[in-house]
Amino acid sequence: MSTSSDTEPALRPTPHLAGGIGLTLRAATLGRPTAPVLSDVDLDIAPGEILTVVGPSGCGKSTLLRTLAGLLSPLAGQIARDGQPLAGPSAERALVFQEDALLPWRTLRANVELPLAVRRVPRSQRRLQAEQWLARVGLADLARQLPHRVSGGQRQRAQLARALAGAPRAVLMDEPFGALDAQTRSGMQDLLVEVLHGTGATVVFVTHDVDEALFLGDRVALLGNGRLTAVRDVPRPRDRTAHDDPARVALRREVLSSLGT
Amino acid sequence: MSRYALRVTALAAALGLWQLLTSLDVDLWLRFSQFPTVTDVARTFADRLAGPDYWTDLTDSLTRIVTGFVLAAVLGVAVGVLVARSPLAEDLLGPLLEVVRPIPAIALVPVAILLFPSNEQGIVFITFTAAFFPVLVSTRHAVRALTPVWEEAVLTMGGGRWRVLGSVVLPGALPGIFGGLSVGIGVSWICVISAEMISGQYGVGYRTWQDYTVVDYPGVFVGMVTIGVLGWLTSTAVELLGRRLTHWLPRTSPVSAARPTPARPLAASPVPRPSGNKEARDEHLV
């Protein structure tokens, strides 16, 4: 993160440097005006934590994420970042999509340069930082390829690099590894943990994969029937050997049964 | 190379057939006896090329079509984007555009004569109108069909509406826009020639009609060949520009029959393949 933290003082209005932001929803109803999908949501997302969100498809996971990004306004209730009301999208909250969110006419490097261009980083700096980010996600050799020339996993790595290049203080991820095969997916999870390390960014990670949610999350939030049904602490997060930990097994069973109903 | 030979042969065969039918004065229901032969046309063509009028006609027609077409491209894209992105613009402009659109541009000759002080501007106006609507409609469709996540991604990078316009809307709609431009240049030729026939002074259409009224049939054919070649050149130019600007589109190789298409790289392969994976050019549109 040293690559980008010293270039944009305007992005850090608060005295405490870098780090994540806290996001809060109070009695919020979320959705599009004609179709509310989640109601009575009370959620505190702590600065710097990784919160995973699981729920059956159509339960409002993406709606929650887009509301946190500022792309949707809550229909009722409040949303706040670090206690201030949240108005509209901003570079401090980056969104990572499931697939095909890279601009297909830009090379991987030019895609990663885009958030830097939006922040008016000088061109030479932009190129350097983009290449450093691509190297961090293992795409140094593919920097000049167009997105459709690389694999799905490589595209998602480039998307991750693009999101983090903007030095966001929260990263909102919408099933980013959902379209990948199991092996690529677990590699991507490890990569995510590695590149997030040291950024201090808050992460909200939406997935339909319970094991992914339990591996990545400090806490896991369960959605169902138009509500936020529970938020649980995950024992031993980001520990591959924890899968037979009795507390983890019990939580996994609880999450699965909540998804089943 | 052999494909070019084939194309030249096909063209030569068509000319040969024409020469044969006309020089033998074939009258089998279709009457070729009044038709000028290829050699007549070629001789007239050579005479015209030597004279000053031919080049004046040519540059006049080209000036008219280029002016009208460029205006149509710029305004068609601008209005298309506006209508696709703004409900207010759609409500204000939509009904008007829908009513004017079905009117053939050449039927606007009376309007052009009333509106513009000179014939020249009237012809450019008609050429413009002809190309404007195909460009407008294809731009509108292309902008509406854009993947929403592209815009959402730029918004969550902190980009504003101009950034979205320049980095997402225009480049993303470009393939569709060029579809409209290709149609537009074709319709523009039809209308510039027709308008010249009706009210021009100089111009390929004017000359062709003049030759017809004085029963100079080889001259008529010289005009037609000229229109054909100019139309072909201008639409090729639009096509090539479009291909250049949308080189990022995934395309199947046109020579795939001759050599096997290189497979897409596997997820595990860390380096680009030397043959199939040509690196994209470094310069960007936006």
Image (tube, rainbow, N blue to C red):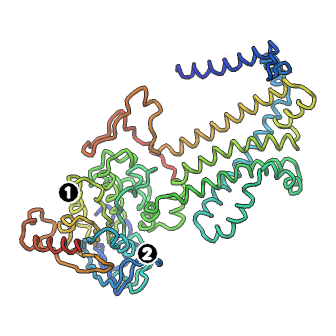
Residue B191 point in image, percent of width and height: 77, 44
Q: How many marks?
A: 2
The amino acid at mark 2 is Leu
- Distance from the alpha carbon under mark 1 to that under mark 2: 31 Å
Which chain does the residue under circle 2 lie in?
A: A
User: Residue B273 appears in which quarter of the rendering?
Assistant: top left
Looking at the rendered structure, the secondary structure element under dot 2 is loop
**Pointers 1 and 2 within a single chain:** yes
Residue A214 point in image, percent of width and height: 18, 68
Q: Nearer the viewer, residue A130 or A187?
A: A187
Give the residue pinned by disc 2. A72
Residue A155 point in image, percent of width and height: 34, 52
Query: Looking at the rendering, in which quadrant would you find the N terminus of chain A?
Result: bottom left
Q: Residue at x 10, y 65 (%)?
A: A243
The crowding category of the residue bearing disc 1, from other C-alpha atoms within 10 Å (few below 14, some 14 to 19, many at least 20), is some
User: Residue B202 appears in which quarter of the rendering?
Assistant: top right
Looking at the rendered structure, the secondary structure element under dot 1 is helix
Query: Looking at the rendering, in which quadrant would you find the C terminus of chain A?
Result: bottom left
Q: Earlier in the sequence, mark 1 or mark 2?
A: 2
List the single residue furthest toward the top: B24
Q: Nearer the viewer, residue B169 or B39?
A: B39
Residue A238 point in image, percent of width and height: 16, 66
Give the residue pinned by disc 1. A186
Q: Is residue A15 visible?
A: no
